[in-house]
């Protein structure tokens, strides 16, 4: 039997080039067909090893699917995004959307937000980009500079509508919410630079969702602070 090489040389916890008598229940063609299929689907060496070791009973579950006794249900990360965000209603008295230039008083001019978010009826959070906007070698970036870079990217910077849809979904669905699905993928912080707020003291802020312990919380952060690699803001690529 010809030996397989590369990351697919280990399948089902055994070496593919073992003696033929050790693999008498499988034909050479079947082994090659499986190896080629895994490679075509983009399986990494680590994932092939995990399959071979039946981690999380992956092979057990796959066998049930092949026998028609189970189905693979893909988690949905889509949320409606049609509800407007009111700073005063959600946060409290004196909170408003910042108006005008960043160096103004925040009370005059157009609202400082990404109005393209208004065109989004549904957001697929599997398609959302979480970016730190750091340049090579930078440990952190000032909030206003991060905002400038986010705007310059051309992406739709998500703001109050996206924040509100995530938060209300979490309040209703908890463990099955999109936020919890994202947490299981390693996401623990999300900033929303698409909406710039004015707090009662006249400072510029953005909305922020974060994990503490086993729960999600929200807060507003000053744009005058610095952001590092663990502080990503959410955006969508603009088509």
Image (cartoon, rainbow, N blue to C red):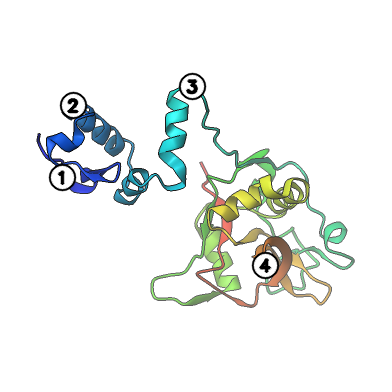
Q: Which residue of the protein is positioned furthest toward the left in this rendering?
A: 2
* Residue 115, percent from left and from top: 67, 50
Instruction: Give the quarter of the image for residue 231.
Output: bottom right
In the image, farthest residue toward the top: 68
The x and y percentages for residue 66 are 43, 25
What is the spatial separation of the Cα atoms under label 3 and label 4, in whole angstroms?
A: 41 Å
Residue 212: mark in rendering: 4
Mark with earlier residue (3, 2): 2
Q: Secondary structure at mark 2?
A: helix
Disc 2 vs disc 4: which is toward the camera? 2
Q: Is residue 140 above or below residue 152?
A: below
Label 1 sits on residue: 5
Contact check, label 1 and label 2, Cβ < 8 Å: no
- Report the disc number at residue 68: 3
Query: Is residue 196 visible in this depiction of the protein?
Result: no
Q: Is residue 140 positioned above or below 45 on the image?
A: below
Q: What SS does tag 4 mark?
A: strand
Q: Earlier in the sequence, mark 1 or mark 4?
A: 1
Left or right: 33, with 198 as reference point: left
Q: Give the CA separation, mark 3 to mark 1.
A: 33 Å
Q: Is residue 202 visible?
A: yes
Write down the residue under mark 2. Answer: 29
Eye-nearest disc, 3 or 1: 3
- In percent of width and height, residue 89 lies at 87, 57
| Badge 1 element | loop
Circles 3 and 1 in contact, beta carbons < 8 Å: no
* Foreground label between 1 and 2: 2
N-terminal of the two: label 2 or label 4?
A: 2
CA gap between label 1 and label 4 equals 45 Å
Asked if the residue under mark 4 is in contact with the one under mark 1, i.e. CB atoms within 8 Å, the reply is no
Horizontal arrangement in the rendering, residue 234 relative to residue 215 (left or right): left
Rendered residue at 37%/48% (across/down): 50
């Amino acid at each position: 039997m010809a030996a397989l090489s590369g990351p697919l040389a280990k399948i089902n916890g055994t070496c593919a080039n073992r003696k033929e008598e050790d693999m008498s229940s499988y034909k050479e063609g079947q082994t090659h067909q499986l190896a080629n299929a895994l490679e075509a689907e983009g399986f990494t060496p680590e994932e092939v090893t995990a399959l071979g070791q039946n981690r999380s009973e992956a092979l057990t579950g796959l066998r049930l699917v092949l026998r028609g006794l189970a189905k693979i249900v893909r988690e949905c990360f889509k949320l409606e995004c049609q509800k407007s965000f009111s700073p005063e209603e959600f946060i409290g008295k004196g909170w408003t959307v910042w108006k005008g230039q960043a160096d103004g008083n925040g009370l005059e001019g157009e609202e400082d937000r990404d109005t393209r978010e208004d065109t989004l009826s549904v957001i697929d959070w599997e398609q959302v980009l979480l970016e730190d906007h750091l340049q090579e070698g930078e440990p952190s970036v000032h909030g206003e500079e991060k905002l400038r870079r986010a705007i310059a990217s051309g992406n739709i910077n998500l703001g109050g509508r996206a924040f509100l849809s995530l938060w209300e979904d979490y309040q209703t669905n908890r463990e099955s919410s999109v936020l919890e699905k994202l947490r299981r993928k390693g996401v623990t912080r999300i900033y929303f630079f698409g909406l710039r707020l004015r707090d009662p003291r006249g400072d510029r802020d953005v909305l922020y969702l974060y994990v503490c312990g086993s729960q999600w919380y929200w807060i507003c952060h000053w744009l005058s602070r610095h952001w590092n690699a663990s502080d990503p803001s959410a955006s969508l690529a603009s088509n």
